Amino acid sequence: MPTQDYYDTLGVARDASADEIRAAYRALARKHHPDVAKDKAVAETHFRTINEAYEVLSDPNKRAQYDRFGTVGNGQGSPFGDAGFASAGFGDIFDMFFGEMRNGGQQQRRSGPQRGSDLRYDLEITLEDAFSGTTREIVYSHLAQCETCKGSGAEPGSLLVSCERCSGSGTMRTVRQTPLGQFVTQSVCTACGGEGERVPHPCQVCAGRGRVEVERKLSVKVPPGVDDGSRIRISGSGESGMRGGSAGDLYVYLNIAAHERFSRDGNVIGIDVPIPFTLAAMGGPLTVPSLEGPLEVHVPSGTQSQSVLRLRGKGMPNIRGGQRGDQLVTLHVVVPSKLSRRQKELLEEFSRAGGDEIEEKGFFERVREAFRPE
């Protein structure tokens, strides 16, 4: 079994994507590069360990073999036993046959411009903010270009030099003897991390990384009508690019806080409103809340509990423009739990006058009415 866990070495989860593994490797390679670290010997050992882990996990075949057997072509726990293939795992042999053809005969040098990573920011707003729109100021950390070295990673006045180990190509060629013959493979140069250049005098501000972590304040304009989970893209406000590459983008994800009175379903706003049983019986005007202020509505006489009034065009605005949604007002008839003597007398009089009679039509009569032409 290997003496190190490759996933722990790179600090990634076992289900990490290829992009996550690549990003972790680049960050560690810059941090532990022998030209940057104070203890050169320790850094060089750590650098070799990082490159060994990356060489395995960046190759799908090697990674699959490592995940299954805990080793890659070293004969320990290998499914090929002593049949001669233990010195070169199947993933290695496949890469020896087809790796060079996949890469056009040579591995592309990675010293060109590199776009910065995108960032995510979660912003919580109220339902009122979503209704009318708002502008919020956010503060977040991101990697910005080092102003001292202008992103080169070199101390001002010094220049980058070509890597002596790989002659500036960023790759190393390795010759291997296998049961199928002699094969030549290419891998990332361990000295320069695939850059093809090294920094003899690293910038003291960014330690040769070319970028520094800074805080940034930004005003975010939230348009009316946004929904929970909506995102706002702010171009060029993500991580700064490398070697002259463009900056990434910032994505602001909106979370709308639950409201104590209103509910929302798309562009439809809902609210529950209690009304006295006298208003339900006789009908009349009623003032109900809305996101734009109090609204006057009419309650029809004989209104039953759970009846719904639809206020057209009083809901959420459409984020793309056009007609607004509706507001649904669900009425709940409230029966008083305590009555005065006079109130009881009036209700008893109401009952004697036939107010307690409940009209209940038979089943067949209801069916005939349902199919009766208008």
Image (cartoon, helix red, strand yellow):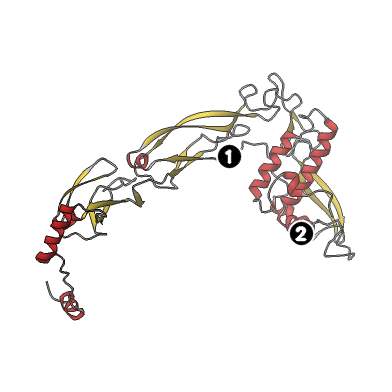
Picture quadrant of residue 211: top right
Q: Secondary structure at mark 1?
A: loop
Image disc number at residue 65: 2
Image disc number at residue 1: none
- Residue 93: percent from left, percent from top: 79, 58
Relative to 244, is 297 above or below? Answer: below
Give the farthest residue toward the left. Answer: 353
Relative to 50, is 162 above or below? Answer: above
Relative to 364, is 246 above or below? Answer: above
Query: In the image, what residue occupies the spot 82% across and 65% down?
Result: 79
Q: Please indicate whether residue 22 sits to the left or right of residue 256 in the image.
A: right
Give the farthest residue toward the front. Answer: 341
- Residue 6: percent from left, percent from top: 76, 49
Residue 307 in sight in this render: yes
Q: Please indicate whether residue 128 sits to the left or right of residue 237 in the image.
A: left
Q: Secondary structure at mark 2?
A: helix
Q: Please indicate whether residue 239 sits to the left or right of residue 368 in the image.
A: right
**Which residue is at the front of the view, 372 or 321?**
372
Q: Please indicate whether residue 196 sits to the left or right of residue 20 in the image.
A: right
Q: Amino acid at mark 2?
A: Gln
**Which residue is at the front of the view, 67 or 157?**
67
Label 2 crowd (10 A; few <14 / some 14-19 / many >=20): many
- Residue 122: percent from left, percent from top: 50, 41
In the rendered image, which residue does mark 1 sit on?
117
